[in-house]
Amino acid sequence: MNKFVSILVCFFMLALASSALAQDKVITMSTTTSTEASGLLDYLLPEFTKDTGITVRVMSKGTGAALKDGMDGNADVVFVHDVAREEQFVAEGYGTQRHYVMYNDFIIVGPENDPAGIKDAPNAVEAMKRIAAAKAPFVSRGDDSGTHGRERQLWTATGLPLTDAKSPQDGQGWYFSIGQGMGEALIFAREKLGYVLADRGTYLQYKFGRTEPYELGIVYEGDDMLKNPYGVIPVNPEKHPHAKFELADTFAKWLVSERGQQVIGSYKLLGQALFFPDAK
Amino acid sequence: MDFLAESLLAALRMIWSLDPEMYFVVYVSLSVSFFSTLIASLLGVPLGFLIAVRQFRGKRVVITILNTMLALPTVVIGLFVYAFLSRSGLLGFMGLLYTPKAIIIGQVILILPWVATFTMAAVSRIDERYRNTALTLGASGMQAVLAVAREARFGILAAIIAAFGRVIAEIGIAMMLGGNIKGFTRTMTTAMALEHNKGEFVLAVALGIVLLTVSLLMNIVLQLAQGKYGDNR
């Protein structure tokens, strides 16, 4: 019995030691679902590890929750897409500096027969107005994500009367605020034969990356208001002394370096470039 | 630690100030759970009763199936019912997916086995002679059944309350079949998951407090009922 216990203790200590060893070159990153779901991170992070020997552990969630992780000191670096909130994050001292990394774009996904007639809308705001006027089903992420943030900006720009949550309607009608991720919102829109504001990467995954067919198509794209810039911010070690600032900063600098930018630009999903390098 | 205390305070303030959004979520949860428990009880209590008092071929198979169904994960039920209610599914034409009715359907499937097996256990515990005595004293078949049910009523009540506790606390079915639509199918559990996703905790903590309070009340009712039962003996 004693022998058994001592073996157990040995194992435990070994495990502790090895995890401590591994830990000195690991950082934790909180990021949005779109970077992970689009497959970019699976392509990018191995290259980064090859160059620097640093491993990145990824937690993916909505932009709001990712920033919250940074504020609570649960992550060493955040990689998200909501410029206003990112700047506030840095201004409040939670992050050291925001680096522009890349952008991708949002699209409006909907039924091919386009019941609200938004295919020829002059701009994205007009497209949203037409959806509201037609009372066509519209699915909102409703989860404080970057995508949801953009949707709220578009609704605000339409000048329609909005609720406190910056949505044109609440409850049981044509506007569905579901508080879930991009994939769930796309599936929901298919069920309702409705419209949804989506990031292109997740949409391509659902349209072409699966065996099951996805019937909705891109009905509106290309407006400047649909551009979606991503930024990376190391967590400020002055707020959270345990944050691994140096490693996190290495990661941020690598992303905006020529090498990192080249890796981002060369990533293709189902034959299409998704992210456009944008470092300044 | 600060932040837990702060969230707790803000949550109590929200409960106190009768925040309409919060109470609507509570209302959706309570009404959906009420109806699924009601339907499951109307079906499950007689079913459990029958299995307990009748002898028939395959009785053990039925009991084994029911016991297995006790372990059904909510997400499996969610997937299964989704496949039927989805627009491309068999019952898609009814347009039930992402409505409170869809949640109720899923939840009934979840707790029906619970109500049935626990009723069965409660009734089986009543001595066979009890029913026979009632019959020899001139009770009709129906009266004898009622006499047994009367004896087993607290076991059955416990089963129903446990089932209610199970549905009001579950999230898989409410999320997959209800879709967490704000102001329509958002329940306490899906709202809490969403708030956690958003990195905000006040509403989640407030709902957690309400959820526990509801469970506490249900259990007090049960305790009171059982206390009375003890006195009567």
Image (cartoon, rainbow, N blue to C red):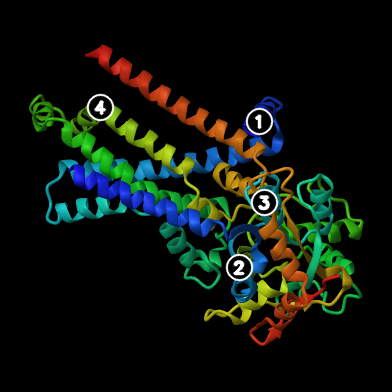
Please, what is the three-letter code of the amino acid marked with disc 4? Arg
- Quarter that holds the N terminus of chain A: top left
Residue labelled with disc 3: A65
For mark 4, does the 10 Å Cα neighbourhood hold few (<14), some (14 to 19), or many (20 or more) residues? few
Residue at screen point 32% across, 16% down: B227
Front: mark 3 or 2: 3
Residue at screen point 66% across, 36% down: B202
**Callout 3–callout 4 Cβ contact below 8 Å:** no
**Residue B150 has which mark?**
4
Q: Position of residue B107 (x, y in %)?
A: 44, 49
Q: To which chain does the residue with label 3 belong? A: A
Residue labelled with disc 2: A187
Please, what is the three-letter code of the amino acid marked with disc 1? Asp
Comparing A90 with A190, the one in front is A90
SS at badge 1 = helix
Q: To which chain does the residue with label 2 belong? A: A
Please, what is the three-letter code of the amino acid marked with disc 3? Ala
Decide if residue A186 is in sight here: no
Do the residues indicated by labels 3 and 1 lie within the same chain of the protein?
no
Instruction: Using the numbered discs, state the Cα–Cα distance from disc 2 to disc 4 in whole angstroms.
Output: 49 Å
Please, what is the three-letter code of the amino acid marked with disc 2? Ile
Q: Position of residue A217 (x, y in %)?
A: 70, 79
SS at badge 4 = helix
Front: mark 3 or 1: 1
Q: Position of residue A34 (x, y in %)?
A: 67, 67
Residue labelled with disc 1: B2
- Quarter that holds the C terminus of chain A: bottom right
> Measured along the vertical axis of the image, is residue A213 above or below residue B159?
below
Instruction: Using the numbered discs, state the Cα–Cα distance from disc 3 to disc 4 in whole angstroms.
Output: 53 Å
Q: To which chain does the residue with label 1 belong? A: B
SS at badge 3 = helix
